[in-house]
Amino acid sequence: LFVQGTLLDECIAILYSLRDGSFAMFCVFLVFILLSAFTILNMLIGVLCEQIQQTTESETDKMLFQQVKEAMSEVYETIDADADGQISMKEFQTMQSNTQVQQALASLKVEPKHLWAMEDTLFAEHKTISFQ
């Protein structure tokens, strides 16, 4: 009864036998069918809404990252004094005082002081790092 009432697999035959046997059980089975159908429908809607929310968040993050990358690229092009496509420690320090860089980091919810604190780590092995 559970499978036939929930998945509605040949439920008509069961309904006919219940109607002929006991009208009360017939009504109970109908209520069960309605409740199980609404439960499954709510679960499917919940899964669909969750998937849409995750996709929206992912796409929003991608767009935000692209906007920040474009903003940082513009700033970097003006700061890259030797035009070698690498960020030197001096150029990195110049970027620290740029308000456009600080706004781009803030839009990513990155506190600039945390990035600036990593300066020694970023330039520990190499004198320059690639911007790409």
Image (cartoon, helix red, strand yellow):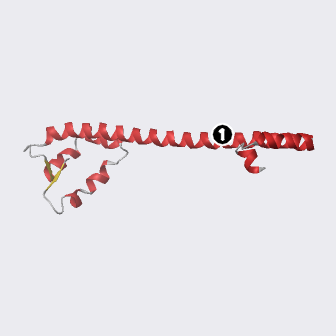
Q: What residue do we see at 88% from left, 44% from top?
A: 25
User: Which x, y percent locates residue 40?
Assistant: 67, 43
User: Which x, y percent locates residue 52?
Assistant: 50, 39
Q: What residue do we see at 13% from left, 50% from top?
A: 90
**Side (left or right) of 125 relative to 22:** left
Query: Which residue is disc 1 drawn over?
Result: 41
Q: Nearer the viewer, residue 66 or 22?
A: 22
Q: Residues within 10 Å of mark 1 (few under 14, many from 20)?
A: few
User: Which x, y percent locates residue 22?
Assistant: 92, 43
Q: Nearer the viewer, residue 2 or 106?
A: 2
Instruction: Give the image quarter of residue 120.
Output: bottom left
Q: Nearer the viewer, residue 89 or 8?
A: 8
User: Which x, y percent locates residue 36?
Assistant: 73, 44
- How many numbered marks are there? 1
Q: What residue do we see at 15% from left, 53% from top?
A: 89
**Side (left or right) of 5 relative to 41:** right
Q: What residue do we see at 57% from left, 44% from top?
A: 47
Farthest residue, direction bottom: 125
Q: Nearer the viewer, residue 99 or 64?
A: 64
Instruction: Give the image quarter of residue 75.
Output: top left
Q: Secondary structure at mark 1?
A: helix
The amino acid type found where label 1 is placed reads Leu
Farthest residue, direction left: 82
